[in-house]
Amino acid sequence: MSIKNWKAGLMAAGIMVLVATGASAQTLRIGLAEDPDMLDPAMAKAFVGRIVFTGLCDKLVDLAPDLKIIPQLATEWSWSDDNKSLTMKLRQGITFHDGEPFNAEAVKFNLERSLNKPGSARRSEIVAIQTIDVVDPYTVRLNLSAPSAPLLAALSDRAGMMISPKAAQAAGDNFARAPVCSGPYKFVERIAQDRIVLEKFDKHWNAAAFPVQRVVYLPIPDTTVRLANLQSGGLEIIERTAPADLPTVRSDSSLKLEQATSLGYQGITFNMANGPRSDNVLAKDVKVRQAFELALDRTIINQVGFEGEHTIGNQPVAPNNPFYAKTVPVQERDLEQAKKLMEEAGHGRVKVELMTPNNPEQLRVAEVIQALTGEAGFDVSVNATEFASGLDRQTRGDFEAFLIGWSGRADPDGNTHNFISCKGGLNDGKYCNPEVDAHLNAARTTNDLEARKAEYQKAAELYLADHERIYLYHQNWFWSLSSKVTGFKPHPDGMIRLEGVSVAK
């Protein structure tokens, strides 16, 4: 079947629902592709939550557009000679949104919370931290069990976000309902599936660099609806503009487009050993998983789902990444081999429930997967699920296969260890291969680029042979903005940084 016919059969029409939020020149309204999960940096897993956190919570360090690590709450840092301790000097005069002081004790509290809180999604990102010394009120030393090359990159994201110790202790497990950080904007309200509202924190250390007074994040899963609201003036920025909508944006003089290549990936996670729902043929038989992958055509998926605007791939990092394992390149579709493997496996037609976020793009991709694998002997049923609910189900093991991705990290460890290692905090499929763990752990202990490449290649050769998940493509980020917005800088991590962003009257 031709790509054109695929597209004709799978495209769905969007329904326009205009946003009315009482905008003013001092309000910036941002259309999100999903509703975030919990607003607690230690517990959160959703990509869109990171967008909100970028305005709400300062981090110890940040990433520049060229991926260099730059100061934020930490002004400088240094490694010990053996690379087993990291000393950080902290910015002085900082307060959290509740007026509590930010200092070395607060850093110690936050990092220990991420290491020890039950259910923490950050623990495996900073697990190398063994003890934390408060050297003086504005100096902290992180003592590691072993050298950890990815640690600074981890501290440029949620693991490095600082929340108020007083607020966290008072709220306990309810902290996410009213998060208290030290970022340029403070929390006002959240109405699930409707909006998250922040307002400017005038006591922020860099408040003058943030002209906007109020930020409203609006989850609008339908890409067509997001764009319609931007065109009508109901939004000022939308993230993840659909590739099919790019010609419209490019031809509209009232809009402008910004883009960056993503650090992450999109693919299918299999439930290998997470509860009763892993008791199925797909989880138990590697030949069946291999057949499933061989039945897929990544080029067709890219064309049908994204007008060919993304980059196909088969690993946690893109083919142009220096850490890509060239010994295991992308395989083309091989339907005959897929059928042969299914015959050898001897299970007959295999039923698979594929859970997917309920947005039009992902649904199109899921339907392509359904059709392609159907030709190889799979009966795939598509289960469209609200995004945050899908993440919760994934964590609980209430899925067989989940069409989901990862926004990516600057260091390859952030795309692998948390998801593939046996005790990874985001390894919701519960895949476990001790040999893979050994190589991923070895890659953490050295700053030697070639040595790290070799370890990641050995790991990839093993986990890709296990087909524990299928990597499909790497997104390119597309932000569409009203022409009234100035100062926006695209970053490859996909975040919307509000420094310097303003909205003309």
Image: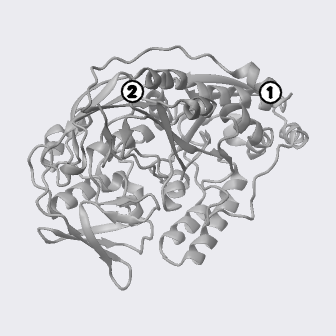
Using the image, tell me which numbered label, if any, was put on residue 77: none
Q: Position of residue 246 (x, y in %)?
A: 59, 34
- Do the CB atoms of the residues marked 1 and 2 lie less than 8 Å apart? no
Dot 2 lies on which element?
Answer: loop
Q: Amino acid at mark 2?
A: Leu
Q: Earlier in the sequence, mark 1 or mark 2?
A: 1
Q: Residue at x 31, y 68 (%)?
A: 130
In the image, 306 versus 392, the foreground residue is: 306
Residue 221 visible? The answer is no
What residue lies at 21% left-to-right and 46% top-to-bottom?
Answer: 181
Q: Nearer the viewer, residue 12 or 238?
A: 238
- Whether residue 389 is visible, yes or no, is yes
Q: Which residue is mark 1?
A: 4
| Res 97 → quadrant | top left
Which numbered tag is attached to residue 235?
Answer: 2
Q: Position of residue 420 (x, y in %)?
A: 56, 53
Q: Quadrant of the C terminus?
A: top left
Q: Nearer the observer, disc 1 or disc 2?
A: 2
